[in-house]
Image: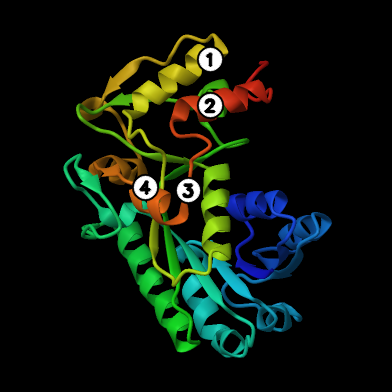
Amino acid sequence: MRVFFFGVGYCARRLVARESWIEASGTARSAEGVAALRAEGVAAYAFDGAHVDPGLERALKKAEAIVVSIPPRDGTGAAVERLKAAINAAADLRRVLYYSTIGVYGDHGGGWVDETSATLTRTFRGLARLEDEARWTAAARARGVEPDILRLAGIYGPGRNALINLRQGQARRIVKPGQVFNRAHVDDIAELTRLVLTRGLEGQIWNVADDEPAPPQDVVAYAAALLGLPPPPEEPFDEARLSSMTAEFYADNKRVSIAKAKTVLGFVPAYPTYREGLRAVVEAGEGRGA
């Protein structure tokens, strides 16, 4: 399948590495990023929201599927506007998939949410994501395709996890009573993406998360135990000094259900909780050493 990726980042790279049937092309923001992707076998082109590399539109017109993984700040709106004609000219296009975030659900007081739940976000980032969901939905429908929106929980996996944060002295155990978060291992995101791309169902919304919404301080403590390190001290939320992004993160409290993906797609998470995911990373040798 010829798949064009707007933003060949962490999740897209993992998907391409796992799935040999994908003939990948896509964008990076810099010449260095383009060179790195081409070395990995991806037909990459520079796109920073304004500049369009020669060859990008030609590759886009050949796409059978488009996967959008660039965040709003990196010009996804510009991608739709600048490249609308190329998207509409993609004769073989069958699927448009947008990586969004469970952050669009906003705060549900710790209750469970599914794909039918209200999107209550009031944050700048959450509202921007909803705008992008609508933008790509309109672009896909204009081409005659019903899009898939994948709402992702907090992404982790090799090279991006609590073990690395601990080793770098950046992990914190901020305790806010009742607060829980879901996570999603990058391999589970890749697997659910594969199912959506290949099952031939009509496009729709899918939550992508683990099975155990958990207090964030517990995840850090578990990671520390795996490494044989003392956990960082607990910090009461009301006393912690937080960046604006972190404060927004803690403002929303919800439990995310993936029952739909399990029932409709037969999705079985390889890492149903953070424990399996972090153990696998440790067993692969990550996080050890000074």
Instruction: Say what secondary structure mark 4 lies in.
Output: loop
- Label 1 and label 2: CA atoms lie apart by 8 Å
Instruction: Say what secondary structure mark 1 lies in.
Output: helix
Asked if the residue at tag 2 contacts the one at tag 1, i.e. Cβ–Cβ closer than 8 Å, the answer is yes
The answer to which quarter of the image holds residue 215 is top left
User: Percent position (x, y) of residue 64?
Assistant: 64, 76
Mark 3, residue position: 267
Which is closer to the viewer, label 4 or label 1?
Answer: 4
Q: Is residue 276 left or right of residue 123?
A: right
Q: Is residue 250 above or below residue 149?
A: above
Mark 4, residue position: 258
- CA neighbours of label 1 inside 10 A, class few (<14), some (14 to 19), many (20+): some
- Label 3 and label 2: CA atoms lie apart by 20 Å
Mark 2, residue position: 278
Marker disc for residue 262 = none
Q: Earlier in the sequence, mark 4 or mark 1?
A: 1
- Label 4 and label 1: CA atoms lie apart by 27 Å
- Label 2 and label 4: CA atoms lie apart by 20 Å
Mark 1, residue position: 226
**Amino acid type of the residue tagged 4 in the rendering:** Ile
Which residue lies at the image location 47% right of the left edge and 48% below the top edge?
267
Q: Earlier in the sequence, mark 2 or mark 4?
A: 4
- Label 4 and label 3: CA atoms lie apart by 9 Å
